[in-house]
Image (cartoon, rainbow, N blue to C red):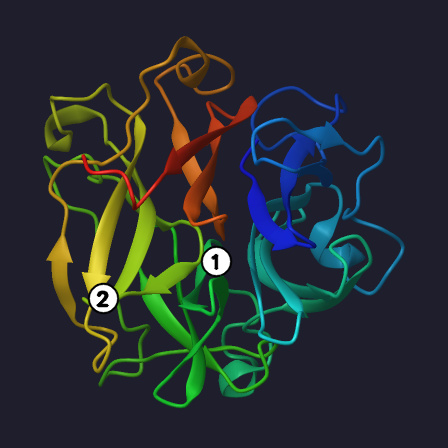
């Protein structure tokens, strides 16, 4: 479930999270990342072995026994794939960075915020990063904003982080030196509990578009149009000149769990969890997790009028 996606050699590759049977219950198993490839983005051929997992390396203390979870992948103009993923040692979950030239052999660089502000955030519970990309010569590549690489990140809120090297990231702070929160959950909306960043963000002619996963609360603050604890996908648009400024946000999700396989598995309340987004053969392929149990794809063709 919960897949990343990337284009290489005119094929789509999906790196998906998979769990073993070492335990029972959410967060009690070990997660590893498998890989599948496709010529058309729909029919997939899975590799029999995972390509990314906790190992006897310098990241073991952060990744064992929970594993490596929920990747997002984007690529630079010169072909370096950058993966932001969650390290889970069953104590603290951390946003981490890995890089690869071929999507199979990866170099782990450790927690994204480990060195920021003299280590202030090295033990911060953090996950879910949408690195900013752009379309250039028909390809989706990592972009700079105001001279720096940039990502939106966060689960219970959204924050911005910037980097000079795509490995060491620095969260933005407010005037009180606390994390600068730019998007929060909204009572009585589909995102009343969580606003969790989704796939790589995209620079458009209107601004920076971020797709995110909104979770509906239970109780009095939930959106009564949707089941309690439902995950549905929203969109928020930021100003390109001032990337922390929201200039548009959907009040209703653009993508909701409807199919039986999106309302079963580990999250029977209903889950469509968007994480992989690629521009391929002039179409957008959005890969998402279904109730923490399957992977599916939705396709948008800009050339088709709706």
Task: Report the disc number at residue 67.
Answer: none
- Asked whether the viewer can see residue 183, the reply is no
Residue at image point 52% right, 77% down: 169
Residue depth check, mark 1 versus mark 2: number of the one nearer the observer: 2
Task: Report the disc number at residue 182.
Answer: 2
The residue lying toward the viewer, choosing from 35 and 175, is 35
Residue 87 is situated, as x and y percent measured from the top left of the image, at: 64, 53
Residue 11 is situated, as x and y percent measured from the top left of the image, at: 65, 46
Secondary structure beneath dot 2 equals: loop
Q: Residue furthest top?
A: 260
Could you say which quadrant of the image residue 102 lies in?
Answer: bottom right
Dot 1 alpha-carbon crowd within 10 angstroms: few under 14, some 14 to 19, many 20 or more = many
Q: Residue furthest bottom?
A: 147
Dot 2 alpha-carbon crowd within 10 angstroms: few under 14, some 14 to 19, many 20 or more = some
- Residue 10 vs 47, above or below: the answer is below
Secondary structure beneath dot 1 equals: loop
Disc tally is 2
Residue at image point 42% right, 35% down: 273
Residue 105 is situated, as x and y percent measured from the top left of the image, at: 82, 58
Image position of 146 (left or right of 88):
left
Badges 1 and 2: C-beta atoms under 8 Å apart? Answer: no
Q: Earlier in the sequence, mark 1 or mark 2?
A: 1
- Asked whether the viewer can see residue 208, the reply is yes
Task: Report the disc number at residue 126.
Answer: 1
Image position of 207 (left or right of 100):
left
Residue 94 is situated, as x and y percent measured from the top left of the image, at: 57, 58
Image position of 32 (left or right of 43):
right
Image position of 161 (left or right of 181):
right
Residues under labels 1 and 2: Cα distance? 15 Å
Split into 4 quadrants, where in the image is the C terminus? top left
């Amino acid at each position: 479930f919960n897949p990343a996606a990337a284009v290489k050699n005119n094929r789509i590759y999906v790196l998906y999270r998979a769990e073993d049977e070492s335990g029972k219950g959410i967060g009690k198993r070990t997660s590893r990342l498998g890989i599948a490839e496709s010529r058309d983005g729909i029919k997939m051929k899975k590799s029999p072995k995972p390509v990314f997992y906790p190992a006897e390396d310098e990241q073991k203390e952060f990744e064992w026994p929970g594993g490596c979870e929920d990747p997002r992948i984007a690529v630079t103009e010169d072909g370096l794939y950058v993966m932001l993923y969650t390290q889970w040692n069953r104590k603290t979950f951390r946003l981490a960075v890995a890089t690869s030239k071929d999507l199979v052999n990866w170099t782990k660089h450790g927690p994204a915020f480990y060195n920021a502000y003299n280590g202030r955030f090295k033990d911060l519970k953090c996950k879910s990063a949408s690195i900013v990309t752009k379309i250039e010569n028909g390809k989706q590549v990592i972009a700079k904003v105001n001279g720096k690489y940039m990502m939106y990140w966060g689960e219970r809120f959204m924050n911005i982080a910037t980097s000079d090297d795509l490995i060491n990231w620095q969260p933005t702070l407010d005037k009180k030196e606390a994390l600068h929160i730019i998007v929060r959950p909204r009572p009585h909306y589909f995102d009343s509990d969580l606003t969790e960043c989704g796939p790589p963000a995209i620079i458009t002619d209107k601004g920076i578009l971020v797709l995110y996963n909104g979770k509906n609360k239970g109780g009095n603050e939930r959106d009564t149009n949707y089941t309690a604890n439902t995950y549905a996908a929203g969109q928020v648009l930021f100003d390109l000149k001032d990337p922390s400024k929201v200039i548009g946000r959907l009040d209703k999700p653009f993508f909701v769990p409807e199919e039986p396989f999106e309302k079963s598995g580990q999250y029977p309340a209903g889950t469509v969890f968007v994480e992989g987004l690629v521009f391929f053969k002039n179409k957008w392929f959005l890969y998402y997790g279904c109730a923490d149990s399957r992977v599916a794809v939705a396709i948008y063709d800009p050339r088709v009028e709706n």
